[in-house]
Image: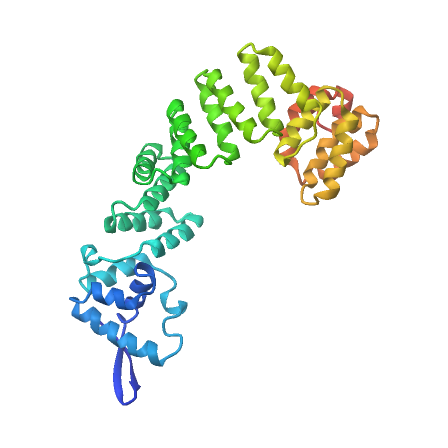
Amino acid sequence: MENIVNVNLNGEVYTITDRTPFPLLLSEYLYEGDFDLMMVDLKEKKDFINECKTLKVLMDNIPGINSNFITSPFIFNDFLSYMEEFNIKINDFNHVSLNGLIDIVLDRADKKDFDIVKKILYFTLDIDSNFAPAYELLGSILIEEGNFEDGKKSLEKAVKIDPWNIAALSELGEAYFNLKEYDKAAEIWKKEIELAPNNYVTYFMITDAYMEVDKYDKAANILEKFLNRFPKSILGKFQLSNIYKELSRNIEAEGLLNEILNSIPEYESDIEIWTKLMIENNKNKTVIKFIEKFIERSENNEHFKLLLVIPYFKSGEIEKAKKIFKNLKDEYSWYIYGLKDSFNAVLNKDELKELELI
């Protein structure tokens, strides 16, 4: 222990050492700032309590002594070293809150500091072996690292402890899917949409899982439920029409396609597939009218102008098409790559040459 400074307050001398900040750290990250509760838990640790008493006097007399410049940054190895110096064991904690540590984990995980994040999470689970958020975050990180098996086990634990943990259900479904356990993935994701029926994307994930094992009847059933909730979804209708074709339900498939061709997109995520289908059915002027108005209302979606290239070409407005392509091809090359199949399918060789696509 190293003495840093002596402080004289009202004739009393208080010694600040290199260990004095630790009670503040411990209070902040394990007791949500409840200094008194922390002292009750650790009342048998005499040296620690003496530092707490010093700090309480300092906090009462020196403004800002418990501010973030003392509790930040959080260095986990130093935190453990302090615990060892004061002989504080995990089983000494009786009334802790783990939310402070989880906040640290979330911040470090965003920065991809996975090694230290995992150490903090294992420490958290040593304190409370039934803390579902820690298992959820640990599973998520393991999966991001490519460790699907261990990630799956951690997420299974999170869901077992807290069956209403939507984030854990979503991640666990993804783990099963990546491990090619498609039926399990579908069942887990179905539990997710029972709890969160507006989780739009999850319906399509369940559909994909069933289609991987050729269970088109179950895939159709999921999308039918989806369209009951989101009846204007063009993407849902298009996907369901393809599944109906697989099931030889051709009349229903055609009916859905006709609905799409006689509608306009309600959701931004539907615009691309709607445009593709409309162009395939020679409804270029309808596309032009809709996209032009959409872009006027939505300045942040400039890349959607590229959807006008084909209908402009096919409507004889070739110079407009070329100008859009020339102006946007460098900035939105990623989007052009995604449209390449559509360009190749609809434009002839001369048109593709004018766009320098061949």
Q: Nearer the viewer, residue 18 or 155?
A: 155
Name which residue lies at 37% across and 74% down.
65
Image height check: is 80 above or below 128? below
Relative to 144, does residue 62 appear above or below in the rendering?
below
Find residue 306 and report its horizontal and vertical position in percent: 71, 34
Q: Nearer the viewer, residue 131 or 232?
A: 232
Q: Would you say 89 lies left or right of 347 here? A: left
Snapshot colouring: rainbow
How many marks overall? 0
Question: In the rendered image, which quarter contains the N terminus?
Answer: bottom left
Question: Vertical placement of 109 versus 340: above or below?
Answer: below
On the image, which quarter does residue 80 sit in?
A: bottom left
* Residue occupying image coordinates x 36% and y 60%: 74
Q: Quadrant of the C terminus?
A: top right
Q: Nearer the viewer, residue 194 or 289?
A: 194
Question: Looking at the picture, how far across and down is residue 83, in whole percent?
Answer: 23, 61
Q: Left or right: where does residue 316 sit relative to residue 1? A: right
Q: Quadrant of residue 13?
A: bottom left
Picture coordinates of residue 6 (x, y %)? 28, 82
Residue situated furthest bottom in the rendering = 11
Q: Which percent across, then down, holds residue 97? A: 31, 56
Q: Residue furthest front?
A: 228
Could you tell me if residue 71 is visible in this image?
yes
Query: Taking 4 as reference, is 43 left or right?
Result: left
**Residue at (62% x, 30% y) in the render:** 232
Please say whether residue 354 is visible from this viewpoint.
no
Residue at the image point whose x is 78% and y is 32% from the top: 289
Q: Horizontal placement of 342 versus 83: left or right?
A: right
Q: Quadrant of residue 63?
A: bottom left
